[in-house]
Amino acid sequence: MERIDSHVSPRYAQIPTFMRLPHDRDPRGYDVVVIGAPYDGGTSYRPGARFGPRAIRNESGLIHGVGIDRGPGTFDLINCVDAGDIDLTPFDMNIAIDTAQRHLAGLLKANAAFLMLGGDHSLTVAGLRAVAEQHGPLAVVHLDAHSDTNPAFYGGRYHHGTPFRHGIDEKLIDPEAMVQIGIRGHNPKPDSLDYARGHGVRVVTADEFGELGVRGTADLIRERIDRRPVYVSVDVDVLDPAFAPGTGTPAPGGLTSREVLSLLRCVGDLRPVGFDVMEVSPLYDHAGITSVLATEIAAEMLYQYARAHRTQM
């Protein structure tokens, strides 16, 4: 199977797969499988992330596979496919997380890695469980406005503020090899970061990121994570709402799109084994700019996977 050729078919034509990749519902032998996770049963404020994967795919026709001044294109270096979506119930978070975990684990039995398009951030615990089953305790690079290490509330075990707490409690994550970037905003209690910091997570707040800059933060990530298998999770609310308004819990004072994309270039110096881009809520988007940016973030992570795993680069 081959990607749709944009020299033959206009980019707005044909069924929209991610970056016009081939569609394979039963992928085997690929480097990275793109998989949608349309679910927002874990949101605590504005819903709509269930429509995120579809919106990202619609806008992804804009993005080519060859970056400026980057030589070979991503898909000349790694073999990727779009496997469609995981069918997730909107009615029961426990069933949804279990379904996502089993589906992602199945993908990793036949393929090297996945890139999950969310969907709300509660699904990341399913991704962590599936990847840790293959690689053991993971390093994590987590870009977000929120730490997502909260306990359960409203009677819901899996909401979008819990995935990394579950990951640490279940020993899916080595917290000493976890870096959270862009944390800011308001929280219900003044001790909201105590759990993460108390377990050894390196929290880089948005203010500290402003002082360190992209280069200093990238150096910190490289030093802390080294060659451990790393899961990279990007919540689009890490970006200032000026750049990504289409999300459920926007927080002013975030990173710019250029800063996020520049920071992700350090992932190619690591050993990435799984990715996700979460919390796109197109109901609150304007002109599709959040979905376009989510596509660019996902494309950057695919390129960095290629850079990390292809020695000729």
Image (tube, rainbow, N blue to C red):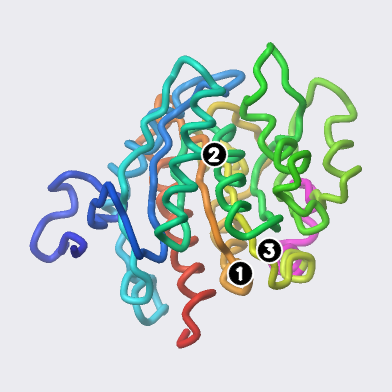
Q: Residues within 10 Å of mark 2 (few under 14, many from 20)?
A: some
Vertical relation: 3 (above or below) 244: below
Residue 126, picture quadrant:
top right
Location of residue 272 in the rendering, given as x and y in whole percent from the top left corner = 58, 64
Nearest to N terminus: mark 3 or mark 2: 3
Q: Residues within 10 Å of mark 3 (few under 14, many from 20)?
A: many
Real-space Cα distance between discs 3 and 1?
A: 19 Å
Q: Name the residue that disc number 3 marks.
A: 214
Question: Which label sits on residue 271?
Answer: 1
Q: Residue at x 35, y 80 (%)?
A: 72
User: SS class of the residue under badge 2?
Assistant: loop
Comparing 139 with 60, the one in front is 139
Q: Name the residue that disc number 2 marks.
A: 242
Location of residue 243 in the rendering, given as x and y in whole percent from the top left corner = 52, 43
Nearest to N terminus: mark 1 or mark 2: 2
Real-space Cα distance between discs 1 and 2?
A: 32 Å
Q: Residue at x 89, y 36 (%)?
A: 194
Quadrant of the snapshot with the N terminus: bottom left
Give, as a three-letter code, the residue at label 1: Arg
Q: Residue at x 72, y 16 (%)?
A: 153
Give, as a three-letter code, the residue at label 3: Val
User: SS class of the residue under badge 1?
Assistant: strand
Question: Image check: 255 left or right of 284?
Answer: right
| Start-end of magenta stretch | 204-219
Give, as a three-letter code, the residue at label 2: Ala
Majority secondary structure of the magenta segment? helix
